[in-house]
Image: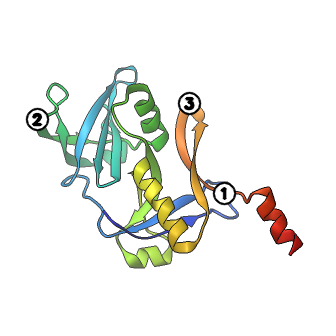
Amino acid sequence: MNIRDVKVNWMTGYANDPYFQILVDEIPDIEEDIVYKVIPCHHDEMSIYYGVRNGFVHFFADNADNRGHGGEVITVKARKEEDPTVIEEREIVGRWSSRAGVINRLHKETGHLGYVMEVAITDDPKAFERGHTFFAGAVTAEFAREVVDCINEWYGADIDLEWVIETNEEPVLKIVERAPTLSEAFDGYFK
């Protein structure tokens, strides 16, 4: 998955956090291209499925009620918990969405996953140009760093990522603009 273009939706005029809108050459297929790790969450009586391919991350929660996503059935490739070298197909009925903060908290607690950031992503240049009809997705923290580097290099921006602890002790990556130093601010003022 290669970055073709990227921008920040600063959510100007809204009380929402800014997020990346990313154009890539190809988004991995969640049923065909990704092999999931399965992390049992005994206190919640569910399992978290977590898969990564070329910086793209897909994750979801599976429990016994089968009502998530309208009961949609998908077939995924997952590593057996008893023997991670064995990959098996599993039919999942009614999975539930999760969020980056939950995955990041689980990784912080267990070390079994990886840090992630939620993004809007597409492989359709027209959708990127319109600025909507993206896929709500996630990328690894390393891929998010590549996105920051692209924006700063390609567009002369000066942004960075910052960890913020949100509700339920969930660490999330946020986009921030770097503030000018005091001398830089005064240089502009006195010229």
Report x, y in % for residue 55. 34, 53
Circle 1 residues within 10 Å: few <14, some 14–19, many ≥20: few
Which label is found at residue 168? 3
Q: CA distance from mark 3 to mark 2?
A: 34 Å
Residue at the (44%, 58%) spot, across then down:
146
Residue at the (19%, 39%) spot, across then down:
78
Report x, y in % for residue 53. 27, 52
Report x, y in % for residue 47. 31, 31
Q: Which residue is mark 1?
A: 178
Does 148 appear above or below 71? below
Does 90 appear above or below 17? above
Dot 1: element: loop
Q: Is residue 164 left or right of residue 145?
A: right
Query: In this orientation, does residue 140 appear?
Result: no
- What sort of colour scheme is used for the picture? rainbow
Label tally:
3
- Where is residue 1, by image quadrant? bottom left
Q: Is residue 21 left or right of residue 157?
A: left
Residue in front for this viewpoint, 181 or 107: 181
Q: Quadrant of the C terminus?
A: bottom right
Residue at the (38%, 39%) spot, across then down:
114
Q: Is residue 54 left or right of residue 146?
A: left
Dot 2: element: loop
Circle 3 residues within 10 Å: few <14, some 14–19, many ≥20: few
Residue type, numbered disc 1: Arg
Q: Residue furthest right?
A: 190
Residue type, numbered disc 3: Asn
Query: In this orientation, does residue 122 appear?
Result: yes
Does 105 appear above or below 99? above
